[in-house]
Image: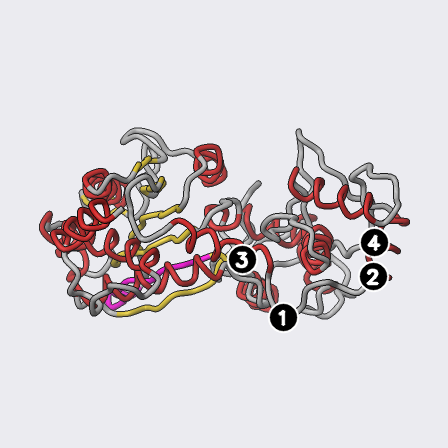
Amino acid sequence: MQLLHRGDVGPAVAEIKNTLASLGLLPANGRPGPALFDEAVEQAVRGFQQQRGLITDGVVGPATYRALTDARWRLGDRSLAFLVSKPVSGDDVFALQERLLELGYDAGRPDGIFSAETEQALRSFQRDYGLTPDGICGPGTLRALKQLAPKVRGGRPVFLREQEKVRRAGPRLRGKRIVIDPGHGGGDRGVTVGDVSEADLTWDLARRLEGRMVATGMEALITRGPNACPPDSDRAAFANEAGADMFLSLHADANPSPGAEGVASFHFGTGNGTTSTVGEALAGFLQREIVARTGMRDCRTHPKTWDVLRLTRMPAVRMEIGYLTNEHDRNRLLDPSFRDVVAEGLLVAVKRLYLLGKDDQPTGTFTFDDLLRHELARAEGA
């Protein structure tokens, strides 16, 4: 679809304005004439993007348009079922997943996409409640869902399962499968300043991290080659099909202000209390390690619903390591020794997640040699 931004007019803008009005973000449009994407619409779009964990640029691109479309649906507006060719998505699907999880059925991550996991959970619920287990959420199933009191309150079962999986995995890195996702690639160079491109820097950093992970006995997989740029949905599908334990996406940032600098990390979260607790913990470890080792400005961790975070079935974090539009950050990223420091920090942060606070060291002090000795000691004691 075409990008919609301030100054645009036409039916597509009218559709966006009607949706924003239905969500209470804009007054109903009663004025005649062509619909205009004015400042009020831009601010409403920004407010919606902020609510949904999207990039708050005030521009309606594919991700924002999809989120606006999903936001129109309420549970009960339509029948819901699993469609392989074109999965159903919407706020009604999210509400169904949340309801099934509250009742103790494993519907997978509540991401608003009616997946095979959601269908299986719905069939189990229908079977237990004496309904036809057809995996379709129609009027009868909806009535039953509303009548039952939930079995679980005060927690997010799917994310509690994530925590338990990390605990059971143990502290050793050997055998763990990590997907490394260097941002952009191929014809998409990402942020480019002069002859410096985000795609080249993230590729180099991914290879440095891959080498260190392999040295510890981990299985490290990279989502793309140097001349390819798969869409984010394909990168997430790659990690899912690989059965990865963790997904780490590497990026650099840009800003119109040359003074913008620092490192930020992002984990899955909708902004309404639904968040990947393990993803959030991993983002925190990664953020603190990089800040401690490099002295970069701490731009903190944030919940987002980007596809690489929303569609992955394992804890996932996207890192924005420095601003290429900032001369100081750019010069540091161009230094191979600095990228080695970042790669070591990323690996140590992953190790900290699995240590669960045991045999740990202060942030920024755990070295790669320490990590290898720790792995060897664990192997000898096994």
Marks 4 and 3 sit apart, C-alpha to C-alpha, by: 26 Å
Q: Residues within 10 Å of mark 1 (few under 14, many from 20)?
A: few
Quickly name the residue at label 4: 76
Marks 1 and 2 sit apart, C-alpha to C-alpha, by: 17 Å
Q: Residue at x 37, y 59 (%)?
A: 282
Quickly name the residue at label 2: 148
**Towards the viewer: 42 or 332:** 332
Q: Is residue 256 above or below residue 2?
A: below
Q: Give the amino acid at mark 1.
A: Gly
Q: Which residues are magenta?
A: 257-267
Marks 1 and 3 sit apart, C-alpha to C-alpha, by: 12 Å
Q: Tag 2 or tag 1, which sits nearer the N-term?
A: 2
Name the mark on residue 245. Answer: none
Q: Tag 3 or tag 4, which sits nearer the N-term?
A: 4
Q: Position of residue 98 (x, y in %)?
A: 68, 57
Q: Position of residue 358 (x, y in %)?
A: 29, 64
Quickly name the residue at label 3: 159
